[in-house]
Amino acid sequence: MFEKIKKSFASSGFDMMIVGLGNPGLQYEETRHNIGFMAMDALCKKYECECKKMKFSAYVGDAVIGNKRVLLLKPLTYMNNSGSAVGEAARFYKIAPENILVMFDDISLEPGTVRIRRKGSAGGHNGIKDIIEVLGSDNFPRIKLGVGAKPHPDYDLKDWVLGKFKAEDKEKVEASLETAVKAVNELLSRGIDSAMNKFSK
């Protein structure tokens, strides 16, 4: 199925790009900052596709979700330079910002919480900030996945987001990944308003 889908894209392009943000490397796997990668992996598992081909300084793949042809992208540029990979892919395939869905971590939301937004500022997230700068627009939808706030004000933020989830949060995180996958399908099938109404907490 994957090969047939891939061939169809060669001549017809993509309706949308879905981006999962994170950092490459074994040391970053399953850390809070990598929940966007984890959401992409969950999406690929659900739709029996892969996001492993190297292109645009990223792992890329393709899928059909909600009858839409979708480019999947996991930037390998490290979080703070996520925009370079996203921008290059968007320019190559002529995908407008409003058709780029980004999944990423949010420290202002508790683990297990999913929030969908049509557009907005970076909110202090360096990966989103870089994407906005490269695209020249903040008009792209996003799925925010809660990872929880640092335990006290003096705790180093970098250490927090690059740390792994607490054991008691893992079940909530898994549930949020399932919700994100459902939200992607809803957004592509029925639009962002429907996805926001059903899955934003």
Image: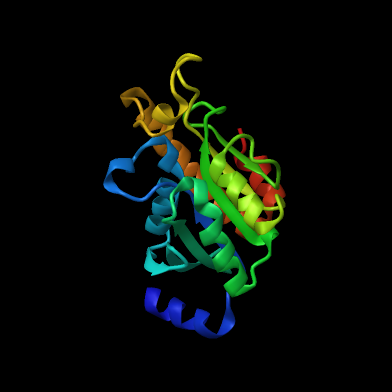
Whether residue 115 is situated above or below residue 148 in the rendered picture = below
Report if residue 82 is visible in the image.
yes
In the image, taking residue 82 as reference, residue 116 lies left or right, namely right
Task: Specify the quadrant of the image occupied by residue 16.
Answer: bottom right
Quadrant where the N terminus sits is: bottom left
- Number of marks drawn: 0
At 57% from the left and 62% from the top, the residue drawn is: 17
Determine the residue located farthest toward the bottom in the rendered image.
11
State the image coordinates of residue 200 (x, y, percent, origin top left).
Answer: 62, 37
Please state which of residues 55 and 144 is positioned toward the viewer in this rendering.
Answer: 55
In the image, taking residue 109 as reference, residue 172 lies left or right, namely left
In the image, taking residue 71 as reference, residue 170 lies left or right, namely left
Quadrant where the C terminus sits is: top right
At 41% from the left and 35% from the top, the residue drawn is: 32
State the image coordinates of residue 29 (x, y, percent, origin top left).
Answer: 32, 43
At 47% from the left and 15% from the top, the residue drawn is: 154
In the image, taking residue 173 as reference, residue 16 lies left or right, namely right
At 44% from the left and 38% from the top, the residue drawn is: 33
Determine the residue located farthest toward the left in the rendered image.
26
State the image coordinates of residue 107 (x, y, percent, origin top left).
Answer: 52, 29
State the image coordinates of residue 136 (x, y, percent, origin top left).
Answer: 70, 56
Please state which of residues 85 and 96 is positioned toward the viewer in this rendering.
Answer: 85
Report if residue 1 is visible in the image.
no
